[in-house]
C-alpha cells in the first residue's frame, strides 16, 4: 500500500496544486474534477506533462457531474448522482464524457458518487437507476476502464446488490470509510466483509456519526474520528489490497492548516503501513 492525495482539477492552478503535492512527498493521486468544460484533449495533454514533470501517478479520475447537489438527508436523495430521474440523463453523459477524458490521461479507474441508491428492490426508481449505471459501466468497459462507486449514501449490502445487478464485470468500490460513518450507514471495518473483494480504491478520511436526523456527521482530522485505521488497514491487507490510501481533506480550514493536516495524515498512515 501507498499513501496518495486528492488533487482538485481547476483552471489556472494545476501546476501549483501538483507541485504542492510533490513537495509533501506524494507520488500518487486521485484527480477530482467537477468541470466538464475542462475535459478536452488540450487539457489532458497539459495535465499529462505536469504530472510527468512532478513524477505523480494519477491512480483514478474522480468524476463529478453538473446540477444541484445537497450533501444532506433532506435534499440529497433528490439531487445527488444518477438516482434522481430529473438529472439522470445529463449526468450519464457527464460520467461518460469524464471517462473519455480519463482515457486521454491514461487512467483506468473512474469514480463517482451515484446517489442514494434505493435499498428496496421493489422501489419504482431502482430499475431505472440500475439501467443508467449499466450504460455508464458499459461505456467505461469500451474504454477498458473500471467504474468505481464512492461509498457513502448507501449501505454496504445495497452497494453489493447494485454491483451484482449491473452485472458488467467492471464495477468496483472506492471505499471512503468516513462517508460510511458520516451518513450513518456502516462501520467501515465491518463493511469489508460485505464488499471487500470489490475494493479498488480507498479514501483516507475520518469522521463522526450523525447525531441529528437531517444533517450528516462531521468530518474530522484523520485519527480523531471513528474510523479504526489500524484495523481497517489490517483488513485491507488480508484482502490483498495493495493500492493507494488517498487522503481526502474536505474540512474548511486555511490553506496552511490543510497543508499541515495532510502532512500529519500522510505520516500517520505511512507509520501504519510500515507496521503491517
Image (tube, helix red, strand yellow):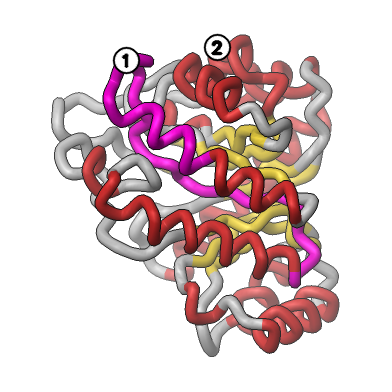
Q: Does label 2 or label 1 sit earlier along the sequence?
A: 1
* Local SS, label 2: helix
Spot occupied by residue 189 in the image (x, y as percentages of width and height): 57, 16
Q: Residue at x 73, y 47 (%)?
A: 141
Q: Which mark is residue 122?
A: 1
Say if residue 222 shows up in the picture: no
> Which residue appears at 74% of the width and 40% of the height?
270
Magenta segment: does it hold 136? no
Q: Residue at x 45, y 19 (%)?
A: 158
Query: Foreground: 207 or 95?
Result: 95
- Cα separation between marks 2 and 1: 26 Å
48 or 203, nearer to the observer: 48
The location of residue 4, given as percent across then percent down, is 70, 52
Q: Is residue 81 above or below residue 36?
A: above
100 vs 83, left or right, is: right
| Front residue of this view, candidates 176 and 3 | 176
Segment tinted magenta in the rendering: 104-133
Q: Nearer the viewer, mark 2 or mark 1?
A: 1
According to the picture, the residue beneath numbered tag 2 turns out to be 190
Residue 247 position, x and y percent, is: 59, 49
Amino acid at each position: 500500500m501507498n499513501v496518495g492525495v486528492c488533487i482538485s482539477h481547476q483552471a489556472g492552478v494545476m501546476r501549483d496544486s501538483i507541485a504542492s503535492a510533490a513537495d509533501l512527498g506524494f507520488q500518487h493521486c486521485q484527480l477530482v474534477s467537477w468541470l466538464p468544460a475542462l475535459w478536452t484533449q488540450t487539457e489532458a495533454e497539459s495535465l499529462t506533462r505536469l504530472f510527468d514533470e512532478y513524477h505523480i501517478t494519477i491512480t483514478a479520475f474522480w468524476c463529478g457531474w453538473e446540477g444541484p447537489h445537497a450533501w444532506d438527508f433532506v435534499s440529497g436523495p433528490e439531487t445527488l448522482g444518477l438516482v434522481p430521474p430529473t438529472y439522470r440523463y445529463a449526468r450519464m453523459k457527464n460520467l461518460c464524457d469524464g471517462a473519455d477524458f480519463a482515457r486521454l490521461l491514461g487512467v483506468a479507474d473512474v469514480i463517482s458518487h451515484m446517489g442514494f441508491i434505493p435499498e428496496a428492490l421493489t422501489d419504482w426508481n431502482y430499475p431505472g437507476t440500475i439501467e443508467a449505471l449499466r450504460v455508464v459501466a458499459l461505456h467505461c468497459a469500451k474504454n477498458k476502464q473500471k467504474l468505481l462507486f464512492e461509498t457513502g449514501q448507501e449501505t454496504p449490502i445495497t452497494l453489493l446488490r447494485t454491483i451484482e445487478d449491473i452485472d458488467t464485470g467492471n464495477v468496483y468500490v472506492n471505499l471512503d470509510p468516513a462517508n460510511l460513518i458520516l451518513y450513518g450507514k456502516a462501520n467501515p471495518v465491518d463493511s469489508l466483509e460485505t464488499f471487500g473483494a470489490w475494493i479498488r480504491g480507498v479514501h483516507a478520511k475520518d469522521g463522526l456519526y450523525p447525531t441529528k436526523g437531517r444533517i450528516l456527521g462531521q468530518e474530522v482530522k484523520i485519527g480523531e474520528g471513528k474510523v479504526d485505521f489500524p484495523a481497517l488497514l489490517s483488513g485491507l491487507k488480508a484482502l490483498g489490497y495493495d493500492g493507494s490510501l488517498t487522503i481526502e481533506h474536505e474540512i474548511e480550514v486555511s490553506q496552511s492548516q490543510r497543508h499541515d493536516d495532510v502532512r500529519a495524515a500522510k505520516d500517520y498512515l505511512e507509520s501504519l503501513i510500515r507496521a503491517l
